Image (spheres, rainbow, N blue to C red):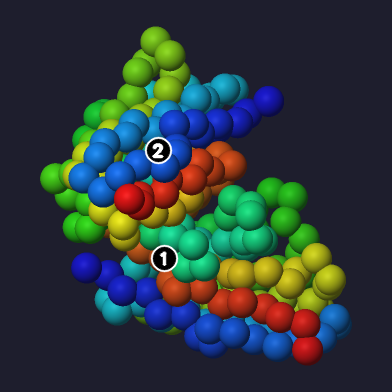
Amino acid sequence: DIQMTQSPSTLSASVGDRVTITCRASQSISSWLAWFQQKPGKAPKLLIYKASSLESGVPSRFSGSGSGTEFTLTVSSLQPDDFATYYCQQYNSYSELTFGGGTKVEIK
Amino acid sequence: EVQLVESGGGLIQPGGSLRLSCAASGLTVISNFMSWVRQAPGKGLEWVSVIYSDGTTYYADSVKGRFTISRDNSKNTLYLQMISLRAEDTAVYYCARMNRGGDLWGQGTLVTVSS
C-alpha cells in the first residue's frame, strides 16, 4: 500500500504570506498526484493534478511541484478565501487511491 | 449542468445495510472512472472504492467484502451497497468522477451507524 504523509498538519499564516505544504509518498508515484482544497461542510475541490498542472478556474497563486516521492503545494500570496484544509492524493494506481492526512491553514 | 447528487444516507444500526446512490447529470457514469470517498466527522478523506469504465472494481481494505460498488447505465447512477455496517463506517460519503484525480464531486450524504 502507498502511504501519503503531509506536513505540517496545521499551519498558521497571514493574508499575503507565501505558504508551502509538503506531501511525501512511501514509494514512487511518478507525477500522479493531485491537490485538493476543502472548506467545512463542502466537498473537496481539485486544485492541481499531475503534480503541477493547474485545474481550470483555479487562481494562479496556487502551484504544485515535485515528482517521485516528494511534492509541494505553494500558495504565493495567501488570500482570505484560501483558509481551508488541503489534501494531497496519489492516483498512480487506480486500484488503490490514497489521501494525505490533510493540512489545515489557519489565520495567524 | 454537470453534477453528481448523492442520496440514501441516514441513521442505521450496527450490522445493518444501506445503499447509497449517486445520480449523474451532464456526464455518463459508464464512460468514467467513478469513486466513493468518505470522511468521518472531523477526520480526513478516505478512498473507499472505484469502478472503471470496463466495470473493474477495487476496494479499500477497510470495506472489502462488505461494500459493493455498481452502476445502472439506464439510470446513469452509481451505487454503493453497504452491509455489516460498523460504527467506524460513520462518515459523509462522496461520489466523485476521477478524471485528473477527482475533478467532479457530489455534495455528500451522511451515514451514521449507531444503536
Task: Say if A66 sits above or below A88 in the image.
Answer: below
Q: Does residue A101 show up?
A: yes
Q: Chain of mark 2?
A: B
Amino acid carrying label 2: it is Met
Residue B80 pos. (x, y %): 33, 35
Residue A89 pos. (x, y %): 44, 64
Q: Chain of mark 1?
A: A
Between A20 and B50, the one lying in front of the other is: B50
Kindly state the secondary structure of the residue where label 2 is placed. Answer: strand
Q: Quadrant of residue A58?
A: bottom right
What residue lies at 37% left-to-right and 68% top-to-bottom? A30
Q: Quadrant of residue B10?
A: top left
Residue A102 pos. (x, y %): 51, 73
Task: Say if A40 sits above or below B52 in the image.
Answer: below
Q: Does residue A28 show up?
A: no
* The furthest residue to the top: B74
Q: Residues within 10 Å of mark 1 (few under 14, many from 20)?
A: many
Q: Residues within 10 Å of mark 2 (few under 14, many from 20)?
A: many
Q: Which residue is mark 1?
A: A99
Q: CA distance from mark 2 to mark 1?
A: 16 Å
What residue lies at 45% left-to-right and 38% top-to-bottom? B9
Kindly state the secondary structure of the residue where label 1 is placed. Answer: strand
Give the position of the N terminus of chain A as an image quadrant.
bottom left
What residue lies at 83% left-to-right and 72% top-to-bottom? A79
* The furthest residue to the left: B65
* The furthest residue to the front: B115
Amino acid carrying label 1: it is Phe
What residue lies at 55% left-to-right and 32% top-to-bottom? B4
Q: Which residue is mark 2?
A: B34
